[in-house]
Image: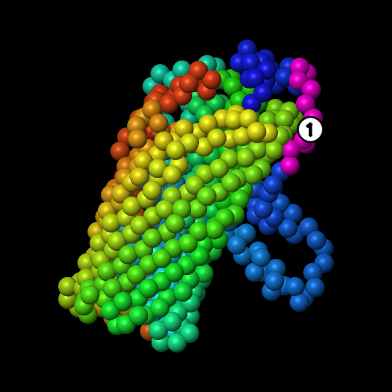
Amino acid sequence: MDPPLQEMARRGRTSEGLQQSVALPQGAGVRLEMKGARHATGRSRGIFDRKERRPEMQKTMIARLLPAALLALASGSASAAGFQLLEQNASGIGNAYAGSAAVAENASTIYFNPAGMTQLQAREVSAGLSLVRPSFKFTNQGSRTGFLTANAQDAGDWAALPNAYLSWALDKDLYVGIGMGAPFGLVTEYNNDWVGAAHSVKFDIRTININPSIAWRVNDKVSLGFGLNWQKMDVEYVKRVALSPLAPLGTLEADDSSWGWNVGALFSVSDVTKVGVSYRSKIKHDLEGSLTVDSSGRVLMNPPASASVELPDTFIFSVAHRIDPKWELLGDVSWTGWSSIDRVDIVPQGMAVDVLDTDYQDTWRVALGANYQLNDAWKLKFGVAFDETPVKSAEKRLTALPDNDRIWFSFGGQWKPSKASTLDMGVAYLYVDDTKINNGDTRKGVVIGEYDSSVWILGAQYSMSF
């Protein structure tokens, strides 16, 4: 950020004074936005501006708009540690996603372990929606943030996470499929005069992942799977540029699309035991967009801006074991390489203006679950999990992501109204211990306090073979 602008804001000048003192070109930056998505403030981005459409173009336009619509919905709030979203189906919520790479109970196995498609019917479709409600309630305990003194509202809110999958058998041993979901996402939003407003007012990460996949049954014991991942990432980051409620707001809006890959294997150890392993690669995003500084609706600066982030790779080891006709036990150990995100430099016109010093560590997650077959139509699901945070300490914790270790308590049910259709429902409560923060510097101020946090997750998944 321009040093004179920061200095004037620190000395307490009003936004009008800043407008009079600094002569800056308006609209100097290039704003990159994904057509068809809806901005967080509700403004349309113009995909529907054209007045005429030929009938033969409708199918093509539907294909183009579906990913954009999913991205608009998938402005999720992190439910797994960091800003990872495990809700790539809703059928796993009831088990806290225990056994995720081994169960292969519907086409959503495309995400967790593509080799699982060999366990499905010849053609299957599955779609679901998860509703996530995090709560981040901050209590100030002596923050040193200049003229920013207001209390904080709850920074969490409801978010919707859709998913959709299709699996198709080419022959008895070769399957192809495609999946769509949102594997990473985060929204935290505070009032714009709270004590940490120079750290963050709003932080919104949205992703959509399209995952074409293939699976091959090597023999009765072993299946292998592989997938490619096209991923779209949108980021919006809003903060005060100085330690005053009258200081202008700076807003970074940037996006990128990139590619990754995933592999998996499924082993049928016996008639009652399956073991699954899967790996998803890192995906690097070189985000491009604009950094807008505005005061009372007037743009003071709008230069092009960029930031780079390498989303982590993940590894899952899962077991599913049927004890008897009624009971099945599930287990899951997963690793996430969060250390790929050490820091994020936000760079307008080639100069680092802001640094998110995340210094994340790699994490582990352990989950245990059970299924009880109540009768031919109903199955009950149970699960618990421990999810480790990538945040190392209170000094490294960001107001944009006040993350901590969490414990999952999950329950769900599966209803089969017919042989070809299944409806899964689940609910989970995530307990988060009191979360300390002591982060900042002389420029942004030091935020000192404690978060009272928790997460609720509700979801439903419908699956059908045809």
Q: Is residue 112 above or below residue 366?
A: below
Instruction: Report x, y in % for residue 323.
Output: 17, 73
Q: Is residue 28 magenta?
A: yes
Q: Residue at x 58, y 35 (%)?
A: 346
Q: Residue at x 46, y 32 (%)?
A: 357
Instruction: Report x, y in % for residue 267.
Output: 28, 73
Q: Please identify the quadrant where the N terminus is shown.
A: top right
Residue 374 in sight here: no
Instruction: Report x, y in % for residue 122.
Output: 44, 84
Q: Residue at x 32, y 82 (%)?
A: 219
Work out which residue is located at the far bottom of the displayed protein and give it: 171
Q: Quadrant of residue 63?
A: bottom right
Instruction: Report x, y in % for residue 338.
Output: 40, 45
Residue of label 1: 26
Residue 205 in sight here: yes
Nearer-the-camera pick, 39 or 291 = 291
* Image mark count: 1
Amino acid at pointer 1:
Gln
Nearer-the-camera pick, 293 or 413 = 293
Within-10-Å neighbours for mark 1: few <14, some 14–19, many 20+: few
Work out which residue is located at the far top of the displayed protein and give it: 11
- Magenta range: 20-30
Q: Is residue 334 magenta?
A: no
Work out which residue is located at the far right of the displayed protein and give it: 52
Q: Secondary structure at mark 1?
A: loop
Q: Is residue 379 above or below residue 71?
A: below
| Secondary structure, magenta segment, majority class | loop
Display colour scheme: rainbow
